[in-house]
Amino acid sequence: MPVPSTNFPYYNAVDQIFHAEWSVAKLARHELLRRSIRTLWPVGHPTQLIHVAGTGGKGSTCRFLEVGFSCVGKAAAFMSPHLFDYRERFSIGGEFVSQDDITYIWETRVRPHCVALAVENAAHVHTFHEVSILIALALFEQHSVQWAAIETGVGGRYDQTRALDVVASALTNVGSDHAHMLGDELWQRVLDKAGIARPSVPFFTSDTALETQEIVRQVCVAAGAPLVEVGDAAVAELERALDRLGLAPAPDSLLHADYQKRNAALALAVIRALAPDADEGALLRAFASASLLGRFWMVEEGVYADIAHNAEKIEALSGEIRKQFGDRGKILVVGISGQRISTKVFRSLADIAQTIIVTSASFKGQDPARVREEVKGIVGDIPVLVAFEPQQALRTARSLQRDDEIIVLTGSTYTIEQALNPDPYLRYLSAHFGWRLHEPNEAIGTIHLTLPKDGLPLR
């Protein structure tokens, strides 16, 4: 019997049919959000949006797009997760919006609409993610933003950001993260993330894996989306251009890390296509100075933090730590959240660590004692300590730190937030996110039971 040729758009159709109750419900959320957008912006939203998906590098690519498009007009970004403050999800011209902006938009634009929608139909309660998307769009309109990068929450095809009309789509890469939601097989995760392809909308990707490229090509052909592949040559070209201009990235710049250059090359390809008259030198200077909170961030002398929260990001971070600090002693404070597999995360950390302190966070945190047991066979003779609270873990690391040693906090964003957030009220709100959804409330009947699981922010 001949081996059939692969047909990934068909496999996606079969998957949707096999899980119709789930897939139709997800797609219905898209339509609900589209209706809200049409209600709030009946003649269409004025900002040109670029949709960014991928396992790693989404936030950095959004920041490169934001600072790059700022060279040709007012630009912004909607990213997730935030580190300390919800307003960090919304950036305009490289700066986070104000707390007053968030309050005003929620109370005068988004909340009245959401309440009216729920009064009309109790099942039509917008989720946290959907509300955040509406807030982003309202902020962009308020600030007359011309260009904005929009990051997916999880995946692509079923993420609520897929409901938006965009002028370009970008896929950074596809790794192993969120397999419990997107599929155990790589091809399943590629199908999901490549699902942001739209008819006649150019699709850019910097993933060079052959299997990923083949699936993306098939999905783009089926969707009628022109495909642009940004490969190693584009990264090398970017490096040469930076050298010609003598642009040495500052220590707090995203481009200080080598692995960020692929994200920058992807963003540059998008900007060149949509704004071909942009000054190349200005773009590269903007890229060289681009920074983002929580990306290899020096908290203080000898203490660093990075929100590398999956195996691929941890591996890239480990290589960067080795490159920058060589043989200096390294104490790692690590908190794992959600359903990520501890052994995958710790495999690359074991190559660079002198001591590992496993901790957790009060929201979605894995039990650090159990994690320690799981990774014993991975880390060999490296001491693995347990601290059940992130601030305690950091205090322990500081007590162990000797001259010339560095401390790196990584893993769950929640862990870093709980260890370092200077605002005790925001720290408390973050630690107890979602508690109201699990409490009985006679005043709202069963509305809280209709909220889908993706109503909670993922980190």
Image: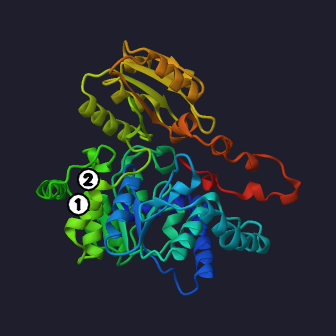
Which residue appears at 60% of the width and 71% of the height?
Answer: 33
* Residue 108, numbered circle: none
Q: Position of residue 159 (x, y in %)?
A: 51, 61
Which residue appears at 57% of the width and 69% of the height?
Answer: 30
Observer-nearest of 381 and 211: 381
The furthest residue to the top: 381
Quadrant of the drawing holding the N terminus: bottom left
Q: Position of residue 399 (x, y in %)?
A: 48, 17
Depicted 334 relative to depicted 214: above or below: above
Q: Between marks 1 and 2, how big is the CA–CA gap?
A: 8 Å
Residue type at the position of mark 1: Val
Q: Position of residue 378 (x, y in %)?
A: 38, 21
Secondary structure of residue under mark 2: helix
Q: Nearer the viewer, mark 1 or mark 2?
A: 2
Residue type at the position of mark 2: Arg
Mark 1 = which residue? 230
Q: Position of residue 252 (x, y in %)?
A: 34, 45
* Residue 262, numbered circle: 2
